[in-house]
Amino acid sequence: MSEVERHSYDVVVIGAGGAGLRAAIEARMQGMRTAVVCKSLFGKAHTVMAEGGIAASMGNVNSNDNWQVHFRDTMRGGKFLNHWRMAELHAQEAPDRVWELETWGALFDRTKDGRISQRNFGGHEYPRLAHVGDRTGLELIRTLQQKIVALQQEDEAEFGDPEARLKVFQEATVTRLLTVPDSGSEAGNRITGAFGYWRESGRFVVFEAPAIVLATGGIGKSFKVTSNSWEYTGDGQALALMAGASLINMEFVQFHPTGMVWPPSVKGILVTESVRGDGGVLTNSEGKRFMFDYIPDVFKEKYAKTEEEGDRWYTDPDNNRRPPELLPRDEVARAINSEVKAGRGTPHGGVYLDVSSRLPADVIRRKLPSMHHQFKELADVDITAEPMEVGPTCHYVMGGIEVDPDTAATPGVLGLYAAGEVAGGMHGSNRLGGNSLSDLLVFGRRAGLYAAEYVAELGDERRDVPQDQIDAAAAEAVGPFNNEGAENPYSVHQELQQTMNDLVGIIRREGEMAEALGRLEELKARAEKAGVEGHRQYNPGWHLAIDLRNMLLVSECIAKAALERTESRGGHTREDHPGMSADWRKVVLACTLADDGGHVDLVRRTPEPMRGDLLALFELDELKKYLTDAELPSAAPSAP
Ligand code: FAD
């Protein structure tokens, strides 16, 4: 095998979205030599596309808000399947992470009295999302990049080299984690580095490091209609799985209720929830505000019964209940799906979302500038004067790499950490809007901190990267050049997306998921024969052929877990098992790599019971909706 470029660091962070950058900043601030590696250009990550805001109970707009209320909302949104310790840490630490961003230079929108403004979002009891218009992610990334530059300037002053302790490697795609067996610990393997290729030259590169933080984001590109962009091919999830870690809760995929449905070229692009948070209403082709017909029993007491009450809530939230357009995303997505199926959809197969009759044009342009621009440019629709057409789009994966809730370490692989969308557990079966940006700040920081701590404890005890693994990774990567003309990776990808959309989508049925698993097997066989022409310099067909392995593995996890879970909960709706079962709440489905290396096995785990003081934050009547009798605390207060 030819010589491979090598770099050596203490901590390597894979992914330069919010989670990756926050982790890298923390590892560097702990004194570690840290690298950030990202597949796309630095600054282009999903985080930059985030629109609505960062959820944090700062109480700036409603002083009744606090971490306990945020914790409760998050658990309710996730239908109590969330890892409660992650939800607790997240709710407690999110305000500090937002304030910290401000001290690092973030310019949030303000309240009239000059505090960070917070907006309403689905499932959040109080206005909670710190935001910058509808371009919050852009400001978040800008601020974190600015912090990185500030740290590099410190290193320039101290060492004469700005990259002495923090360096960014952009357009480098990691295809394998490198490990050695670890007999001395409970974990099966120990991290030694990562293998990848430069997108531009196609040459290979190895990053040697005892600790790796995976922060590679989501999996949306396995589905046909998605708000996700080209990089979200489940790489981190697959890399972790292949290194010996587990993926949990993979059946829970979030279909955001409002994606664009027209024109076809932009189908799936996100329409931010802020439109509803700021007063937008959903209507069907008959002009009816249909969400009032879809309030599930578990939320009946918390949402307005009439349009009048819902409308009053925007100006008097203390004496009225919120409108059902602001139910958690899974509920709204299912409702839209049902309306369209019942023949009450728009000409292009969505429903109407109207903000033009609810807010003055100048307010819409000020509060929702990106949405105004997006619809004008892409669909020739002026949202200050006419309604939008919207429908569900695959947006986020709640499942992900199993991690320790405090340290973000993966139990199966020593030295491997994961944070942000790639990690599982925090959001249970359904994520609330705004809870991802806060999640990636809270757990990005923790991952960087504990990765640094782990490396500090290791001292000089580092293992070499095994040469045979580098050779195998290189041979695997060039494989598609030896399959010339066999299978077109684009066709395999298209069929995968169609399969996941049609058979493992928003409403699931046993027979269809079994069919999907059969098709995935065929697609895997075809993907192994996927061939590419040309050379390794900037060859997107080759890149896709490599990504297919990851998308297919992750899709198998989703389909297997979805077939196994015979209940409906959050982002997993079974037409054949419509109810939510308290017994299933006690089951976490975990995927591990099968011995053959090309499939996944499913194992059942029992989640740790929630701590008593956290259970006591809920009324007994509410807990009864989610927990088995054996789990109910005897002392929880009943509703008055
Ligand atoms: P990302 O930001 O997705 O970054 C992943 C990084 O990993 C990228 O740098 C990528 O290049 C890199 N990468 C991937 N694979 C590899 C590989 N193999 N090798 C090297 N690098 C790799 N959430 C909210 O809380 N509030 C919102 O308002 C909001 N709005 C959203 C709007 C849109 C349009 C979208 C798509 C999402 C939105 N979300 C929102 C969700 C949120 O933005 C994402 O969940 C979150 O940004 C994920 O952050 P991350 O750091 O985990 O990963």
Image (cartoon, rainbow, N blue to C red):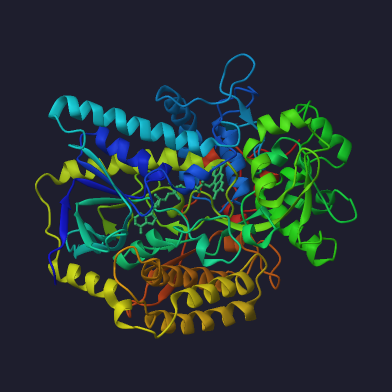
| Image quadrant where one finds the C terminus | top right
Q: Nearer the viewer, residue 591 or 315?
A: 315
- What x and y, as percent, mark residue 584? 58, 63
Say if 65 sits above or below 288 in the image: above
- What x and y, as percent, mark residue 205? 21, 59
Q: Furthest residue to the front?
A: 534
Q: Furthest residue to the right?
A: 286
Is residue 187 rendered to the left or right of residue 437? left
From this viewpoint, is residue 600 visible? yes
Say if 329 sits above or below 614 in the image: below
- What x and y, as percent, mark residue 565? 58, 69
Q: Residue at x 54, y 76 (%)?
A: 495
Q: Residue at x 57, y 60 (%)?
A: 253
Is residue 267 rendered to the left or right of residue 337? left
Say if 48 sits above or below 548 in the image: above
Q: Residue at x 17, y 51 (%)?
A: 7
Q: Furthest residue to the top?
A: 113
From this viewpoint, is residue 635 visible? no
